[in-house]
Amino acid sequence: MYAKILIIEDEKDLIKGLKLNLTDEGYEVEYALSGLSGLEKALKYKPDLILLDIMLPEMDGLDVCRKLRQKKFASPIIMLTAKGDEIDKVVGLEIGADDYITKPFSLRELLARIKAHLRRTQRKKDVISDVYSFGDVKIDFIRFKISCKERSYSLTSMEMDILKYLISHSGEVVTRENLLDKIWGFKSSPTTRTIDNHILKLRKKIEEDPAYPRYILSVYGEGYRFMG
Ligand code: CA
């Protein structure tokens, strides 16, 4: 199936050009001319990727992005920024954008970024099946095993669930609250210390030197970030 791309942009000529080229590349393309209609369309149409302009009528692109993430919209969002736009990486990351491209951009550059982001999300979807490896570590989700160089350990189902969640959010900050919510659910109420203990155990199985982790990093005051 072809990936669906939603363009939220108020410059009609730009939309026309993008739609033509993206359709040529085999993508299914939808567009919206204002922030508000873009937000509605994104939630209804569930695109695999969004190209989002910042200066938009009704609701600006930053708000659209923020609202989409609040509503757990997970596909990559590439912001289309004009040269003078007061936006930097930090602002973008805070509101949940994945990437930026400054206008005027080259079509080739844009297509390359789109492909890279779609590949990344596809990889995340593939991960959770049976085997996943990174560095010297190999996780066998079917046999509940993890091996790192010559060492091999079994995983508890809790550790597996945590690993799966971290892997499927690779590169992102995962808060302790996210983990409590996703892994334990609302029924039980473990403390955040429980999570930290599980992470410590996982690190002993994964990391060469658990005191200086390479894969499950701590993000001060937030939680963890998986890099693998
Ligand atoms: Ca605009």
Image: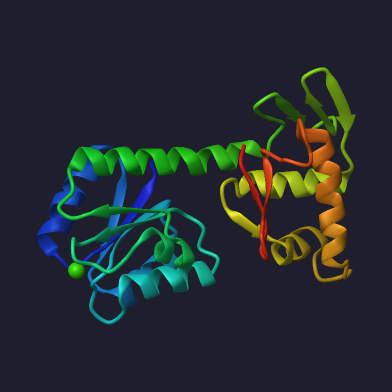
Q: Which quadrant: the C terminus?
A: top right
Q: Position of 169 compared to 100: left or right? A: right
Q: Residue at x 26, y 44 (%)?
A: 110
Point 36% across, 38% down: residue: 115
Query: Is 3 rendered above or below residue 197?
Result: above
Instruction: Identify the image quadrant of residue 103.
Output: bottom left
Q: Is residue 175 visible?
A: yes
Q: Residue placed farthest to the left in the image?
A: 13
Left-right relation of 115 to 18 = right
Residue at point 82% right, 65% down?
Answer: 192
Farthest residue, direction top: 150
Q: Quadrant of residue 11?
A: bottom left
x, y percentage for residue 141?
78, 34
The one of 94 and 14 positioned closer to us in this rendering: 94
Can the viewer see residue 1 in this picture? no
Q: Along the horizontal axis of the image, is 173 left or right of 90?
A: right
Depicted 221 relative to depicted 209: above or below? below
Total numbered labels placed on residues in the image: 0
Residue sitting nearer the eye, 86 or 44: 86
Question: Quick one: 102 or 131, which is closer to the camera?
Answer: 102
Point out residue 152 in the picture as x, y percentages from the top left corner. Answer: 86, 24
Residue plotted at (38% across, 75% down): 63
In the rendered image, residue 77, in percent from the top left (x then y), is placed at: 39, 57
Q: Residue furthest front?
A: 211
**Residue extending furthest toward the bottom:** 58
Q: Position of residue 133 (x, y in %)?
A: 67, 28
Query: Going by the image, does 150 lie left or right of 38?
Result: right
Q: Ligand 1 is found in which quarter of the picture? A: bottom left
